[in-house]
Image: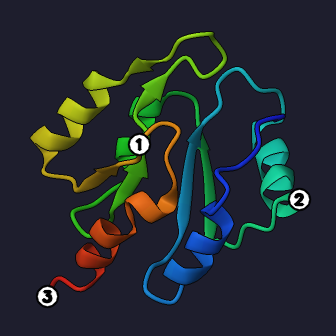
Amino acid sequence: LQDEPVPDAAEALRTLRPKFFIRLLTARKTYENAFETTQLWLFNHGFQYDELIVVNDAEDKEAHLTSETLLVDDFTLGHHKAETQENTKLIAKLKKAGLPFVKFPLGGLWADVMPEILDFANKP
């Protein structure tokens, strides 16, 4: 993995960790040794989390979600290509299953979605 992290991502997870169990779900079908490579990248960039799950395809993430989890995702496909596409299939599946999610803005910052995430944490 050669991508740089979103500038405020590691700090955002440190802020959220006292309120949430941080489970990172990532789709890495095309990577060799995907778990170890991702784990090393996260360590090298100072990310703190509780669990890392690597799946083949983005749609496989649904199996690890419940109504009490909150998926934060950019819902894009084709990160390795010049242009990405919105993953409307996964969004539709989550809506149909009643699974909560926050769409992370592509090219955005965690500060853009923190209010929505913290609102979820404060729901009864």
Q: Secondary structure at mark 2?
A: helix
Q: Earlier in the sequence, mark 2 or mark 1?
A: 2
Residue 111 percent coordinates (x, y): 46, 64
**Would residue 64 be found to the left or right of residue 53 on screen?**
left
Q: Nearer the viewer, residue 13 or 110?
A: 110
Q: Nearer the viewer, residue 47 or 66?
A: 47
**Would residue 94 be found to the left or right of residue 24 on screen?**
left
Image quarter of residue 113: bottom left
Image quarter of residue 19: bottom left
From this view, report whether residue 6 is shown above or below residue 91: below
Mark 3 belongs to which amino acid? Answer: Pro
**Which residue bears the numbered disc 2?**
44
Q: Secondary structure at mark 3?
A: loop
Residue 54 percent coordinates (x, y): 62, 44
Measure the C-alpha gap from mark 2 to mark 1.
24 Å
**Which residue bears the numbered disc 1?**
105
**Which residue bears the numbered disc 3?**
124
Mark 1 belongs to which amino acid? Answer: Pro
